Image: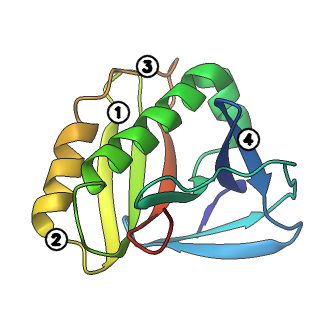
Amino acid sequence: MKPAPILLSALAVAGAIAVLFLSRRTTSYWNPVDSTNYVARWRSYRPETFRQQVGRTKLDHVRLLSEQDAFEREVGVDPLVYLCKSIDSTVSDVAESGTASYELLVEASLSPDGRPRFQLASRGQAPDEELQRIQDALNLLPPLNTRGAELRFQMVFSIGQGGN
């Protein structure tokens, strides 16, 4: 088992990403992308305002698979928020034209070479063509270099499951 420090729900609040930390307990998370079990002690925080679902896509949460301090040290908060918002926007833009309902997990790996690497996993009726369009669009996002360490995080979306 690998340690993971924190599970986050990212919610857009007044143009920024607010963070919802889930309860203060030790739990495990099985990652379907790398088939690894992560164990961590989670902290809680609830923002006053939650991101509203717009269109077919809802960002459910963001999960850091690397230490939170490492993200702050290696890339900084503002560039990470910008990347998360870019991923959210990219997934929403591509999925908006679809009709299928599914859950999508986007795993991002950041490294010193600057080009984020993305892996996708889905549950439900995700069409392969739509997943490929999402993958292709994510691969066009701008670079985000770390200062030396590889960092990983996940964003989980509900697509076509209610909303406006």
Q: Nearer the viewer, mark 2 or mark 1?
A: 2
Q: Amino acid at mark 1?
A: Pro
Whole-angstrom CA distance, mark 4 to mark 3, is 23 Å
Work out whether mark 4 precedes mark 3 in sequence or the reverse, and give the earlier one. 4
Work out whether mark 2 precedes mark 4 in sequence or the reverse, and give the earlier one. 4
Query: Disc number at residue 127?
Result: 2
Work out whether mark 3 precedes mark 1 in sequence or the reverse, and give the earlier one. 1
Where is mark 4, residue-wise?
A: 18
Work out whether mark 2 precedes mark 1 in sequence or the reverse, and give the earlier one. 1
Work out whether mark 4 precedes mark 1 in sequence or the reverse, and give the earlier one. 4
Q: Secondary structure at mark 4?
A: strand
Q: Amino acid at mark 2?
A: Pro
Q: Amino acid at mark 3?
A: Asn
Work out whether mark 3 precedes mark 2 in sequence or the reverse, and give the earlier one. 2
122 or 33: nearer the viewer: 122
**Residue at 13% from the left image edge and 67% from the top image edge:** 128
Q: Amino acid at mark 4?
A: Ala
How crowded pointer 2 is (Cα within 10 Å; few <14, some 14-19, many 20+) is rated as some
Q: Secondary structure at mark 1?
A: loop
Whole-angstrom CA distance, mark 2 to mark 1, is 24 Å
Where is mark 3, residue-wise?
A: 145
Q: Nearer the viewer, mark 4 or mark 3?
A: 4
How crowded pointer 1 is (Cα within 10 Å; few <14, some 14-19, many 20+) is rated as many
